[in-house]
Structures are given as structure tokens and as C-alpha cells.
Image (cartoon, grey):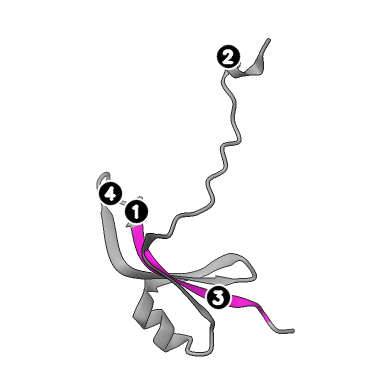
Amino acid sequence: MNETRELLIGQTVSLSPETAISASHDSRGGVLLCEGRIEAVGHGPDLQARFPDVPVTDYGTGLILPGFIDAHVHYPQTAI
């Protein structure tokens, strides 16, 4: 079975849960997706070298963000 992979290139920000304030920014970061799920995150050119046959979508200076889902509601929003 062939897995569908895609490499996204653009700006990335990584947060580290080990420390209270630890964030790193990569202006050429990469996110490797496999079947729509994150398989690897790192420096874009490094990921391109490791996975040369994977199609690339380059967002230039755009920031790559996850799809945010707000699954909660506040009482005043319930119209009750």
C-alpha cells in the first residue's frame, strides 16, 4: 500500500513543554505529512534531503499552523 506524503515548507515555531519559556523559530522549517498526519518536523532543507521523492508545497514566508478547532463554548454563547 502506498502512503500519501507531502512536505510543507515555510516558517515554523516549536514550543518545548520541558521549560516555561522555550520557543524556537525556523524561517525555513518543514512539516512532513503522511496520510494527513504529522510524521516529522524539522528544518525544511534537511527534510527535503531525507525524503527527496516526497512532493513539496512551499509557502515561502508564510507561517505553517495547525488547524485550530475550538471545541468548547461559554455559557453566554448558548442562547439560554
Give the CA separation, mark 2 to mark 1: 32 Å
Number of other residues with Cα within 10 Å of mark 3, as a class: few under 14, some 14 to 19, many 20 or more? many
> Disc 2 or 3, which lies upstream in sequence?
3
Please determine whether, in this image, residue 39 is positioned above or below residue 54. above
State the residue position of label 1: 15
Name the spot of residue 50 as percent of width and height, x first.
Answer: 43, 87
Q: Main secondary structure of the magenta part?
A: strand
Q: Residue at x 37, y 76 (%)?
A: 44
Q: Identify the residue position indicated by label 2 in the image.
A: 76
Residue interval drawn in magenta? 3-13
Q: Which residue is mark 3?
A: 6
Q: Nearer the viewer, residue 60 or 10?
A: 60
Q: Nearer the viewer, residue 58 or 14?
A: 58
- Quarter the N terminus occupies: bottom right
Is residue 79 a member of the stretch shown in magenta?
no
| Along the viewing direction, whichever of 14 and 6 lies nearer the viewer | 6
Q: Earlier in the sequence, mark 4 or mark 3?
A: 3
Q: x%, y% of residue 49?
A: 40, 88
Judged by depth in the image, the label closer to the viewer, 1 or 3, is 3
Identify the residue at the far right of this view.
1
Q: CA distance from mark 4 to mark 2?
A: 35 Å
Given the image, on which type of amino acid does mark 2 rest?
Pro
Q: Nearer the viewer, mark 4 or mark 1?
A: 1
Q: Residues within 10 Å of mark 4 (few under 14, many from 20)?
A: few
**Which of label 4 and label 3 is nearer to you?**
3
Distance CA(mark 1)–CA(mark 3)? 23 Å
- Which residue is label 4 attached to? 19
Residue type at mark 1? Leu
How far separated are the C-alphas under marks 4 and 1?
9 Å
First in sequence: mark 2 vs mark 1: 1
